[in-house]
Amino acid sequence: MPNANGDRAAMAKFPASLFTLAASLWLAVPGASAAASWSLADDALAILEKNCLACHGSAQMAGLDLRQRETLLKGGTRGPAVAPGNASESLLYQVAAHVGELVMPPGSEEPLPAADLETLSKWINQGAPWPASEAEGNAEPEWWAFRKPRRPAVPTPAKYANLVQNPIDSFVLSKIEEKNLALAPAAGKLTLVRRAYFDLIGLPPTPEQIDEFLNDSSPKAYEKLIDKLLASDHYGERWARHWLDVVRYADSEGFESDLYVPNAWRYRDYVIKSFNEDKPYDRFVQEQIAGDELWPDNLDLFESNYAVPPEKLEHLEARVGTSMYAFGPVIPESNLDTPRLLYERLTDWVDTTGAAFMGLSLGCARCHDHKFDPFSQRDYYSMQAIFATSQPVTIPVVTEMSAVHRRDDFPRYIALDEARDAYGLFEDRVKKRITDKKREEFSPEVVAAYEVAEDDRTEEQQKLAAPLEKAIEALLDFDRGERTRPDLRKYMTPAEKDEYETLVHRMAEAVISFPTLDPSHKVEYDTFFDVPSATVLGHVEPELIQAVHVRDRGDVRQLKEKVGPAIPRVFGDGVNFEPKERYGPRYRKEFALWLTKPHHPLTARVMVNRLWQWHFGAGIVSTANDFGRQGRPPTHPALLDWLAREFVRGGWSLKSVHRLIMGSSTYQRSSEFQHEGNTRKDPTNSYLWRMNRRRLEAEAVWDNIHSVAGTLNTKMWGRPVLPPMSQTEMSPLRRKWSWTVNADPKDHTRRAIYILRRRNFDFPMLEKFDTPNSAVACERRDVTTVAPQSLWLLNNEMSFQQALHFADRLVKDHGDDAQAWVENAWRTAVGRPPTSEEKQDDLEMLEAAWAQGAWKEPPGEWPEALRTIDAPRAAALTELCLAVFNLNEFLFVD
């Protein structure tokens, strides 16, 4: 952490310094008593499921089955497991607390955590009640997705039992046997290493990394590969991009104005960091919905130095998670109509929450009761009421001491402002002189009409003034739409030119000396004098909270009955939304705690389904944002429930689910398999008799090109980057100045997750490869194969420059050896050597290109190593590299 003598600018950087915390610092979720909708019995059963059911569930070791209250009380060979009302005399509690010789789980050196033991003790002392819906036979919701997931028994396939590597395979192979489908063979190691790299980090393996894996003959080689990739910082960048689709991330507000959201990127970095640290998913959800309410805090300094306690940084990070609600689409004109603005904001928040965390199309109930799912209009607006006490607020992400240093630097800002004003006054004098001279060319009537303010002119005066107005605009070469400043130097006198040089130099000095560019200063600003900040969720003053009403047909002006905060009735009505907090209602806190209960019917199911989709190309539920009746039913319902329960049992660890999925023989199956019977019975491969071949997403295509070319800049974090574009690509931008290309060329080749994402103008290359509409949550990207993709890869200036660098890399490593070029172009780009036929074709292509004698003059940005060979050979090699970028094998993962 910064100290009094150190570089306090590091405090402004997220997350490299400000939010870098040890994983062990995560705090327990506050509010252990939780919402009333979830009983103590549920908490106790969740502890049993996590720690005990592997042996005392279906296996019934020692004759003990803990899955039902009757069998719990009956006990096993050692007698009853529980003495209701007396925890200290209950065998279950004794073995969990390590009281006596018998301890559980077997081989454990420590008892269960104190919080778990306290929960078990309270539960037993209250009579070991069972959840009401199970004990009293209350009817659960009819639809499968609204019922609590139960851990199913793992089936045993008959024909393919020898292929089971973990329970995932048991479910999948049993279904394949049931459907009488043929099974694809296992994929080769070469396919697996490329598949694993692109899946987990979104980058291709180098030839050296491929060889390392192929040459590792140990049984743990594949497991070690997965662990290495999951430990890479690139993992967070890859998987954060998936999540950003779900929460409709963008750096601008959309609609006609598409206004910039200056600090949205802090949320992007928060997600990357969360994935890299394997933040428990329940915590991840809680932070985004209610980080400020669950962990209220600020960054006040600790004692008398610059150190900030780690828990304060952790709490600030949780609050940054709520930025998810601050970068939604906004119609600027709605700021003139407060009721409409609030309504549009709450609509976006509820729709996004329902889609992202619950996998539900709640938005269908905004105008009328849901036509398919059990959600009424009242349910929908009750969800809005949960968020009605909240509003976006901008907070500093540095300590109050930074504001002190900001005031210390304020004279520098004044100096810059005064230098700019001085230049403006000088410019006005020059403009007046040259425009006065231009006026002399027109009649007094025209000049008089021109001098009338534009808004005050009569129709006749507008006609008279128009010629002089156009002449002056042409003289000054001024474009109002682009906000360009006129270049007056060609009209300046020698004395004016001297003054111009002095004033420009003064402005430049003021800019250069500004602390944002000087890391030795105490504060490093985001931009000029812009204190590092985040826009997050805060609270409306209690007396200003607007009531929420059901809207007739969703019309903002047509109010019906008033509603309070509540979850949809199909899930019960036990969440207590009564204000208990000293500083007003904290409804989001109660909602977040309810949503992350271990047996919640949707939360774990929805997320493991997303992970499955991002690995296989399709989810077990193929409509990942709609688990309702309009969505597709699960292809493997028992597997989905097993994964959901295993996810919770494993501490909501995303990386543990990756290991499960990728460790299965299902994931390791070949995609190069066709079977006529399978194609007829299961044309979409819903039952996974083979692996799905998948096209790389737009960002992965960009990263792949730059990685193979050897130019990828792996710098992490920070403001979005804006790579250069051609004039044609820039033409749709109404305000060209809104795309200011980064000054440092190294920033132009950073990973695509860091490229500015505007809602109304996506970076053209990414748009060509199907980036989603960021106005709404994206459950699954479209995948197209269209001509503009190949045209871009063949003809775009960026693609050409990267082909040059790829060619330069080949020459640098292999000299002027055409056979080595071809061999290593394939190994670098697609992970394998070319076949003899492919190699011969490429060599013939090189020969034909050499004969054309291209590049009599080398291109301006010709890399150094490429200059060491003849221009025709350099041109031919570059054409080969462009062709490699267009290989299907380069763009797809088997």
Image (cartoon, helix red, strand yellow):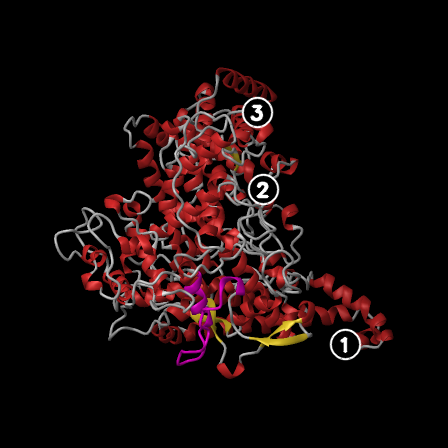
Mark 1 highlights which residue?
455
Q: Give the magenta-colored segment's residue range.
A: 569-595
Residue 128 pos. (x, y %):
30, 62
SS under mark 3? helix
Residue 41 pos. (x, y %):
35, 62
Compare residues 859 and 654 and report the one nearer the observer: 654
Of pointers 1 and 2, the one earlier in the residue sequence: 1
Calculate the distance from the C-alpha at mark 2 to the C-alpha at mark 3: 33 Å
SS under mark 2? loop
Q: Label 3 crowding class (10 Å Cα cut-off): few <14, some 14-19, many 20+?
A: few
Residue 124 pos. (x, y %):
27, 63
Residue 131 visible? The answer is yes
Q: Residue 589 in magenta?
A: yes
Q: Which mark is residue 769?
A: 2
Q: Residue flagged by tag 1: what amino acid is it?
A: Asp
Relative placement, left or right, of 152 versus 477 is left
Mark 3 highlights which residue?
677
Q: Is residue 329 above or below residue 748?
A: below
